[in-house]
């Protein structure tokens, strides 16, 4: 992962490149949903510097779409990680459904 200028947009772009590079493998998986979830999880930054950079770039990461995911979590950096994971997994699933549709159309 490139940690020089971490933004949510750069993470999503890098995630999509990763998914594209593994497209055939993902689409041939028995459970491709699990695979894209795993890949998205791998792109969530772990270093405070990167998490803070993402938050500075997009302050909406301070609010979660699904508060249930962070029930009882008070660590601000963990909450940012959860918010980033929400965004990345959403982008990953959007990519997956589009890739599956494209493959179905090609058949």
Image (spheres, grey):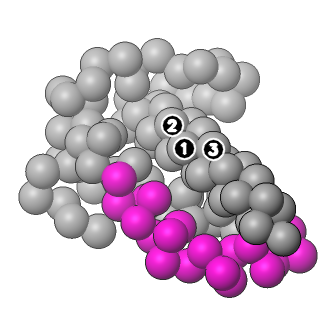
Span colored in magenta: 13-33
**Residue indicated by mark 2:** 87
Name which residue lies at 70% across and 58% down: 102
| Residue 26: image location, x then y, percent | 69, 74
Proximity of marks 2 and 1: CB atoms separated by less than 8 Å = yes
**Residue indicated by mark 1:** 91
Give the crowd class for mark 3: few <14, some 14-19, many >=20 residues within 10 Å: few
Q: Earlier in the sequence, mark 2 or mark 3?
A: 2
Tell me the distance, in whole angstroms, between the alpha carbons under discs 2 and 1: 6 Å
Where residue 29 is drawn, which disc sits there?
none
Residue sitting farthest toward the right: 30
**Residue indicated by mark 3:** 94
Q: Quadrant of residue 36?
A: bottom right
Give the crowd class for mark 2: few <14, some 14-19, many >=20 residues within 10 Å: many
Task: State whether the magenta stretch is mostly helix, strand or loop.
Answer: helix
* Quadrant where the image shows the N terminus: bottom left
98 left or right of 77?
A: right
**In the image, is residue 16 part of the stretch drawn in magenta?**
yes
Q: Quadrant of residue 75?
A: top left
Of residues 23 and 30, the one drawn nearer to the viewer in this rendering:
23
The answer to whether residue 36 shows anywhere in this view is: yes
Residue sitting farthest toward the left: 4
Of residues 69 and 95, the one drawn nearer to the viewer in this rendering:
95
**In the image, is residue 30 part of the stretch drawn in magenta?**
yes
| Residue 67: image location, x then y, percent | 64, 19
Front position among marks 2 and 1:
1
**For the residue labelled by badge 1, is the local secondary structure a helix, a strand or a loop?**
helix
**For the residue labelled by badge 3, is the local secondary structure a helix, a strand or a loop?**
helix
**For the residue labelled by badge 2, is the local secondary structure a helix, a strand or a loop?**
helix
| Residue 5: image location, x then y, percent | 12, 51
């Amino acid at each position: 992962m490139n940690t020089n200028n971490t933004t949510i947009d750069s993470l999503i772009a890098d995630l999509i490149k990763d998914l594209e590079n593994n497209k055939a493998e993902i689409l041939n998986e028995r459970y491709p949903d699990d695979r894209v979830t795993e890949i998205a999880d791998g792109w969530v930054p772990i270093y405070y510097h990167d998490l803070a950079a993402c938050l500075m770039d997009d302050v909406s990461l301070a609010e979660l779409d699904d508060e249930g995911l962070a029930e009882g979590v008070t660590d601000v950096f963990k909450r940012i990680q959860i918010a980033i994971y929400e965004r990345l997994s959403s982008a990953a699933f959007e990519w997956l459904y589009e890739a599956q549709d494209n493959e179905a159309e090609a058949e």
